[in-house]
Amino acid sequence: MGLDMYLYRKTYVQNWEHQTPEQRHTISVKLGENAREDIKPHRIAYIVEQIGYWRKFNALHGWFVDNCGGGVDECQQIEVSAHDLRVLLETLREVKRAIEDKDSKTIGILLPPVGGFFFGSTEIDEYYKERVNETISIIEEAVNEGEHEEFYYQASW
């Protein structure tokens, strides 16, 4: 039990008759070496990738809920725009600088830990610092790869 957190990228891949062959996607789903007969490639409209996973990084959870989810925390899918990801990335970089400067006040303002049932520690400790660095890498990659993609965040506990 605990706070499990996921960031997904959703990419539109629907093929249309009016598209040229160069514009069309080729999609196949296999189980082992065999094509999945129950999944029809021509009906696939989106590919969803899990691009981030965190466990009990409650400060990040709080950021997504407050900045993208309107303060509603019900394990729902929360739409995250590319702009939101850029804002988050800058926030994380500022938090990293504050950690290096031992500026706990700034950290507490920018990315404060959030308490909750099985949400983990609310201390700004080594785990918190490691998650900040890990998250910077994840969000940098998402920002660089998917300006026109759809993103969403979802947590469960």
Image (cartoon, rainbow, N blue to C red):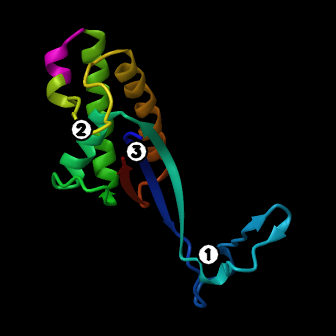
Category of crowding for the residue at label 1, using alpha-carbon neighbours closer than 10 angstroms: few (below 14), some (14–19), many (at least 20): few
Q: What stretch of residues is rendered in magenta?
A: 102-107
Disc on the earlier residue, 1 or 2: 1
Taking the spot 50% from the left edge, 47% from the top edge, the residue there is 51
Q: Is residue 42 above or below residue 128?
A: below
Quarter of the figure with the N terminus: top left
Tell me the number on the disc at residue 116: 2
Q: Which residue: 42% across, 61% down?
A: 148
Residue 63 on the magenta span: no
**Label 1 belongs to which residue?**
23
Mark pair 1, 3: CA separation: 34 Å
Residue 17 point in image, percent of width and height = 61, 90
At x 37%, y 34%, the residue is 56
Q: Is residue 149 left or right of residue 62?
A: right
Decide which of tag 1 and tag 3 comes sooner along the chain.
3
Cβ–Cβ below 8 Å for labels 2 and 3? Answer: no
In the rendered view, tell whether residue 22 sits above or below residue 106: below
Looking at numbered disc 2 in the image, what kind of residue is underneath it?
Gly
